[in-house]
Amino acid sequence: MKRAVAAACVRRERAQILLVLLARAVSSVSPGCPERCVCDDQHVVQCAEQDLLNFPSGLPLTTRQLILSNNRISDLPALELNYLSDLLYLDCSNNSLTHISESTFGNLRKLAYLDLSFNLFGRIQEQTFGALESLVMLRLTDNPMLSEIHPQIFSVPSVLQVLDISRNNLNRLNVSFLMALGGLRSLGLSGNPWRCACDTEELCFWMHSNTFKFIEPFLSRLKSADVRGELLDKLVTAKKPSTWI
Ligand SMILES: *[C@@H]1O[C@H](CO)[C@@H](O)[C@H](O)[C@H]1NC(C)=O
Ligand SMILES: *[C@@H]1O[C@H](CO)[C@@H](O)[C@H](O)[C@H]1NC(C)=O
């Protein structure tokens, strides 16, 4: 009898210890912040420079700013990304991204700022940013293999104001792409191997009639130059990395 009572006590004690351990395990996982990231009460999730190879899992659904820069992430999974429907700011610069598609950003209707610079994109295909109806600023610089941007990567009308596609491997750009961006205020095109042929002449004329969109000192140089083939070559491939076209 005594032994039975003692055994029951031990069992109860064990159960209690187990409960305590379980509670500790649960509370040590701070609710909804991925490993190696820091989440604050302003809905900012900071995961920069953490040697991440994959998109962090378990992001808070209320995330508004997500900073993934300086990692080695090679894929943006559409499913996980599109749960973040409150996202305003996404910095994926300096990763190993090679591919994005129409579905990647398919549900990010509030996203205003997107940085995809310093990645490994080869081409940007049709409607890639079509769902981003609030996108104001797109930085897509320093993708050494990026040689093609489809003229219809945005839906119409787009509210984009700032576009930087400097220092890629672009040699042509369909001018209808720029003409469709009615709200564009600044454009960076420098550091691309622009080809100056008949099909880029249109681009030259567009640039000439939209000089207000380029910042100094490019403006004065453009005004004094003749808008002809080699102009693009001279102006657009300005060497200084910080020059906006
Ligand atoms: C990219 O990230 C790596 C690793 O954090 C860093 O060493 C490198 O300086 C970064 N490059 C740029 C251009 O920011
Ligand atoms: C430029 O884009 C428009 C619209 O997508 C297309 O109709 C046109 O054929 C393109 N022009 C060239 C030279 O690719």
Image (cartoon, helix red, strand yellow):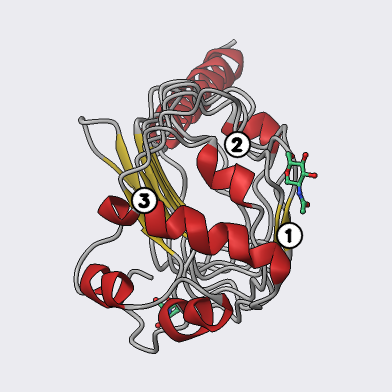
Query: In the image, residue 98 lies at what x, y percent?
Result: 71, 62
Residue placed most toward the observer, 45 or 82:
82
Q: Amino acid at mark 3?
A: Asn
Question: The residue tagged with tag 1: helix, strand or loop?
Answer: strand
Left or right, 127 with reference to 136: right
Cα–Cα span, label 2 and label 1: 13 Å
Q: Residues within 10 Å of mark 1 (few under 14, many from 20)?
A: some
Q: Which residue is mark 2?
A: 129
Image quarter of the N terminus: top right
Picture layout, residue 155 above or below residue 244: above
Q: Which residue is mark 1?
A: 123
Left or right, 71 with reference to 65: right
Question: The residue tagged with tag 2: helix, strand or loop?
Answer: loop
Q: Which residue is mark 3?
A: 210
> Would residue 92 be visible to someone looking at this image?
no
Mark 2 Cβ inside 8 Å of ligand 2:
no
Residue drawn at (21%, 30%) of the image: 41
Which tag, 2 or 3, sits closer to the chain's start?
2
